[in-house]
Image (cartoon, helix red, strand yellow):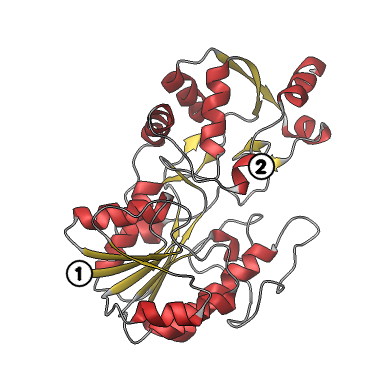
Amino acid sequence: MRLLVMGGTWFLGKHIAEAALDRGWDVSTFNRGRSGKDVPGVKPVHGDRTVIGDVQRLAAHGPWDAVIDTSSSDLPPRDVLLATSTLKDCAARWIHVSTVSVYKGWPHSQLADDSELLECPADVDESYGYTGANGSPTVYGFQKAGGERAVAESYADRAVFLRPGVILGPGEYVGRLPWWLRRAHRGGRFLAPAPGKRLIQPVDVRDVAAFALDQAASEITSGSYNVAHPDGITFEDFLDACLEVTGGSGRPVWVDPAVLIENGVKQWTELPLWRTHDGVWSVDSSRAVATGLSCRPLRETIRDTWNWLQNDGCPVDHPRWAEHGINPKKEEKILASL
């Protein structure tokens, strides 16, 4: 199996490259060579996927049985189209890592694989789309929907779309789980969003990588799949696991969402993974599960991420890391007011 990974040096792309090598595959990667080291054993090609000459040079290294694209999250649709239209004759299939944000109803409604998508052309730039007054839809969602359209225009029934919600695990660059782990370890009272029994559905990066590789090798040549943990974990159990693996002495103080909002706590970032919209953690992943998605218990993800942080955990320098976590002084002020 000859595989091309668009990206391949950090988090999901790195896990995909490593796991593909473990399967005995011939693996090429394409990236700018700036955000991380090439995985030993891959055939790296360095270049900018937004530059046509670089993508044409990449095409000369083919052919491949499949491409797995992990590096389009910050790209406008037209740049996705540049890659897919240039590589369509030298790569048999395209596995596209997208997002649940492409759905028109996210995060307000329950989502299935056939839920309605946002509309976005395949050839537009980063200015296309808008963010609604209630935070939905988002420019990001439109852009990712346009990226899917770009893949579909080039690959038609040779395209597979993976739509994860939140991906956690060793190597995370966003900083959601690392922040909670460090907050639990630091000790003292800390804010926790009630209700504690609410389920969340993050998925382990290694499980996403395995599913992406399975789709690259599958005889099923097309489809779309929501990639979310089918069982999930309650927020209470999530924080309990953070305390357990870190040995922290922290004590969660469960606070009603209305009180948190009244005190100006930003959902999704200041308390990572917390959002009050009904559909955020109501993602049906049954089609992916039926096709082979297997998700490990999230306590294992939490444990392994802490071990990574304690050992060689050096996240890629990414601006989103700084967005996550509430300022200690703000947290103390809210706790004192309760």
Residue indicated by mark 2: 323
- Within the image, what quadrant is residue 326 found in? top right
- Above or below, 270 against 11 in this view is above
Q: What secondary structure is marked by label 2?
A: helix
Residue indicated by mark 1: 1
Res 26 seen here? yes
- Above or below, 52 against 104 in this view is below
Q: What secondary structure is marked by label 1?
A: loop
Specify the amino acid type for callout 2. Answer: Glu
Residue furthest left in the image: 24
- Within the image, what quadrant is residue 214 found in? bottom left
In the image, 1: left or right of 174? left
In the image, 321: left or right of 303? right
Taking the spot 31% from the left edge, 49% from the top edge, the residue there is 294
Taking the spot 64% from the left edge, 80% from the top edge, the residue there is 124
The one nearer the camera, 249 or 286, is 249
Q: Quadrant of the N terminus?
A: bottom left
Res 155 seen here? no
Q: Position of residue 200 (x, y in %)?
A: 53, 41
- Crowdedness of circle 1 by 10 Å Cα count: few (<14), some, many (20+)? few
Q: Position of residue 50 (x, y in %)?
A: 53, 74
Specify the amino acid type for callout 1. Answer: Met
Q: CA distance from mark 2 to mark 1?
A: 39 Å
